[in-house]
Image (cartoon, rainbow, N blue to C red):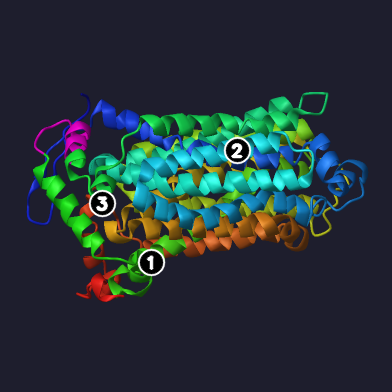
Amino acid sequence: MAGGNFMGADERGCEYPGKLTRYVALTCIMAAMGGLIFGYDIGISGGVTSMGPFLKLFFPSVYRKEALDTSTNQYCKFDSQLLTLFTSSLYVAALIASFVASFVSKKHGRKVTMFLGGLFFLFGAVLNAAAVHISMLILGRILLGVGVGFANQSVPIYLSEIAPYKYRGTFNVLFQLAITVGILIANIVNFLTNKISAGWGWRVSLGGAAVPALVILISSLFLDDTPSSLIQRGKSEEAEQLLKKIRGVDNVDAELKDLVEASEASKKVEHPWKVLLRVRKYKPQLILSTLIPTFQQLTGINVVMFYAPVLFQTLGFKANASLMSAVITGAVNVGATFISVYCTDRYGRKVLLLTGGVLMCVFQALVSALIGWKFGTTGVVATVLPQSYAILVVLCICVFVAAFAFSWGPLGWLIPSEISPLEVRSAAQSVTVSMNMLFTFAVAQVFLKVLCWMKFGLFIFFAAFVCIMTLFVYFYVPETKNIPIEEMSRVWTEHWYWKNYMDDVDAKEVV
């Protein structure tokens, strides 16, 4: 056994003895690998849509504008609704799948839900790699989306429920770290496969999604379910033995009692969706589960990450140079996430969100200014872009990505997964995943068209949203550092605004 001791206190003054064990650390790392499938897809889709052979086969009109028509407005050369449908169809599927995953997670556990996520993603990867028609690509993307919906529904909750509360933030951030590693791996794969002269490199890129799918698929076979999930499904004795195993001590009575009480309360709630939507005391969880993932996507981060090669190519970079720039931003994304791994449980969630918000706002505005300076409103550049300009653009984008990576990236998943009581936790997480996927879809579907219309002003639009959400965090997001997950109600009763919603209405009164 390894790690430091921790003592959690419940509202009656009882303490939770235990320590951070090697088993818990390894379990959380394996579960967090579910983020690889989401990250790999974000990174891979933008890369293949900048590859000539892929565009020539599936999107010939875009290929002609990009490769053959040198007079085309740089802002509009990739504008194609079919092309954006390829990217964004995954997120519609993930949105719908998250609601199904909520039911599966509650009835059959987090482990089964993760396994199914890996399985669907594997099927989608194989279909995409073998595609010979656009319909095969879209169907493959839909299967990938179902996998993402199941994984994103189950993994954050799993990590929040199984990790000791003092380390909950650190281990939950591993999910985002896995996403960033997936993006980086995808960028490297794209860079290498683009060099395959025979023109089938895009098949390797898309088929490579099978690797992270197998990682989560195999990992889930060796994971135990969480104590909360076991108790919720009537397996209290198994949950007690597991709790002793993951805490590294035999005395788990206090924590087990709280988990059983939370489970009994959740069983009184027959319709968690109706309760979440109608009971006043759950409004804070509902509002934050809705707004946090919405704000996360309106930072513009996924525009940068899954359209990075296209974006850099639009800015005048050559194909290989644009893919290499995407590799650089992907590496920055991974590196900066370690800041969150280190700081989340030491300094709290809010300080990271506020710091990241300020940096993102400033550097989004700088990116907009740099693009406007060279491309203006016409999208046409009279001269070759100087190297110094290219370096400055990449630098600003890297700072923006780094700020997101230590703040809204990981915390946009962590906070919603830890703020809800057991009786509505799966439903609230479905809201988080569905809102995340809805706005990811919306941004992906309209970005290329809006870039053509708004030009460099699009980045000002995202910067304005970053300012708004930073103010929202300052006033309305409570600090959840070092609060045991089953005692999270205290953050609402102590908050200057949300305490007004903490009344005595019982959820079982809602039919």
Q: Residues within 10 Å of mark 1 (few under 14, many from 20)?
A: some
Quadrant of the drawing holding the C terminus: bottom left
Which of 456/414 is in front? 414
Whichever of labels 2 and 1 marks the residue nearer the N terminus, that label is 2
> Given the image, on which type of amino acid does mark 1 rest?
Trp
Residue at the image position 19 percent from the left and 74 percent from the top? 504
Between the residue at mark 2 and the residue at mark 1, the CA separation in whole angstroms equals 30 Å
The image shows residue 414 at horizontal and vertical percentages of 38, 49
How many numbered badges does the structure rendering display? 3
**Closer to viewer: mark 1 or mark 3:** 3
Residue 354 appears in the picture as rendered: no
Q: Residues within 10 Å of mark 3 (few under 14, many from 20)?
A: many
The image shows residue 68 at horizontal and vertical percentages of 92, 42
The image shows residue 12 at horizontal and vertical percentages of 7, 56
Q: Which residue is mark 1?
A: 273
Between the residue at mark 2 and the residue at mark 3, the CA separation in whole angstroms equals 31 Å
Residue at the image position 89 percent from the left and 51 percent from the top? 72
Which of 276/498 is in front? 276
Q: Which residue is mark 3?
A: 232
> Given the image, on which type of amino acid does mark 3 rest?
Gln
> Given the image, on which type of amino acid does mark 2 rest?
Phe
Q: Is residue 418 magenta?
A: no
Would you say 432 lies left or right of 265 here? right
In the image, the segment drawn in magenta is 240-251
Residue at the image position 17 percent from the left and 35 percent from the top? 241
Residue 63 appears in the picture as rendered: yes
Q: Is residue 241 magenta?
A: yes
Q: Residues within 10 Å of mark 2 (few under 14, many from 20)?
A: some
